[in-house]
Amino acid sequence: MSTAISTKKTVSHYLMDLFNTYSITHAFTTGHPLPFSPQQKTFPITSLVHDQATVHAADGYSRATGSVGVCFLRNDQALPSAITSIATAKLDSVPLVIMLNQSNRESRINADPFSMSQALTKDYIYVQNHTDVLNSVQTAIERAKEGRPGIVIVEVNFHHFDAYITHKPYVSTKKPALKLKDDQANLICDAIKHAERPVVLVGGGVIIGQAHAELHDFITQTEIPFVSTLMGLGALDEDHPLHLGMVGMHGTYSANRAVHKADLLICLGVRFSDRITGNIKGFSPYSKKIQIDIDPAEINKLIPVDMPLIGDVKDVLAKINSKHLQKTSVTWINEALSWHQTSAKFHKVTHELLDPSMILTTLQQEARCDCLVATDVGQHQMWTAHHFRLRGPRQLLTSGGFGTMGYGLPAAIGGARKKANQQVILISGDGSFQMNLQELMTVSRERLNIKIAIFQNGYLGMVRQWQQLFYERKYSEVKISSPDFSMLAESYGINSGKAHTIKEAKALIKQAMATDGPFLMTFAIEDEKNVYPIVPPGSRNTEAMLGGE
């Protein structure tokens, strides 16, 4: 990986070349332009309102493109504002490089940014002079990408970007990947051969590791039924005939039942959070477990594993696919697929009552086939996981591990920078949306093709649901007020509309999709509509409440 040696140019000029070398085509900053004057015309940088949103935008861009997300924060005082978004990216293994403007360390009045971020980052690089900027940034990009992706902070004086230097070609420092040995591959093949009820559990690591083609080959050869975590949705088309749905707390009946009955569970890039496992003692109790993960810290952390494999899931699957793989028993396939018919029945509305499933189905029908879907966190996130059928990887932008409310709008801004006029459908709730609604200013200024759908029920819906189901309806601090979102959008120059009935909703969605640029839709949904299935706290996944709505 290299570029030709050139005459003396500014650090910022070489920095943009470096970004392009790593397929980073966009960056993000907060509040004011950076000192990149000539380069900004050839390397676009989007300025957001809030530091937290800036990091979320870089995160959304990275998830959408597979490239490292890059953002610039003005000073050490910006880091406390961004710490939630840094944690969000860490837990979902998103590669980010955060450029932090260097201030006088002796005069700092806030918490030290290195100490504050140490638990959340893979590395923290302090740049002392302008000649070290490029090598430091390249090291940060490589470090953010290698192994389990994560965040690297580069503390650098932004005035260094104006300095003139002569720079050598960039040379990739990528380390060779660990290779799966033949005897390990043979053990996996043997386990598949002798399994009567195998299941593949697909995690976010498959998407992060760009292993969807290898996964497709593996499933095609073996015909093993597979389930997904929230972060694994879209690794393969959700309507694949062998896909049983999402597993875990809000997973489908069929997915949770298959995992429970499995005698072999092949886990690909999975962290085994409590959202996936439910009560650990009851998680897939009869199965031999194979876990493939690039991060050794995730092996045997929560769930005992019989065959741990530390490595890149893409390389491991490619090696396994080269072997002779046994096809799964037709009896098991038919049994697992039959459970689709007894999955939780979602509320069938009558007359003119608005239902989230209908809104999401209509949104998908009217959206472009290459659209991205961003969500905030709450009931609408789970409804989206169930009802917006993802067709491929990197289509969904959502906060899984940290569950960050306010993630959706800035992440949608980042996703919208994947390519020119990239369509993004943002699904949010009236609670989550108010966490970062200031970024409507950014959406309006940049005229981004983001279609915003707000589910308005006047509650922090998921917390209200827990209080209803598990705390005897003792509601506390869950009733919320909201602005008139349509008037708010119009005040920013963004087209908008409201819907209270099915007829109005369908017409509004058609109007939004036919409108150039951003559009905000508000849907008045049932105030106490619940998400089902739901596994009660401390229960096994097989003890999910299916709902009687």
Image: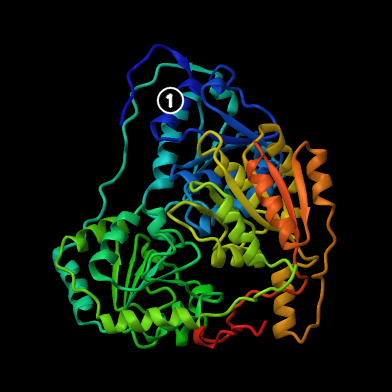
Q: Nearer the viewer, residue 416 or 157?
A: 416
Instruction: Name the residue that disc number 1 marks.
Output: 17
In the rendering, at what x and y percent does residue 40 appear? 56, 23
Q: Nearer the viewer, residue 81 or 197?
A: 197
Quarter the C terminus occupies: bottom right
Q: Tell me if 359 is positioned left or right of 41 in this view.
A: right
CA neighbours of label 1 inside 10 A, class few (<14), some (14 to 19), many (20+)? some
Amino acid type at mark 1: Asp
* Residue under the image location 50 percent in, 65 percent down: 230
Q: Tell me if 531 is positioned left or right of 169 in this view.
A: right
In the rendering, at what x and y percent does residue 169 appear? 33, 24
* Residue under the image location 46 percent in, 87 percent down: 282
* Residue under the image location 41 percent in, 38 percent down: 139
* Quarter residue 3 falls in: top left
Quarter the N terminus occupies: top left
Q: Nearer the viewer, residue 308 or 166?
A: 308
* Residue under the image location 62 percent in, 66 percent down: 357
Q: Is residue 208 above or below residue 29?
A: below
State whether residue 164 appears in this view: yes
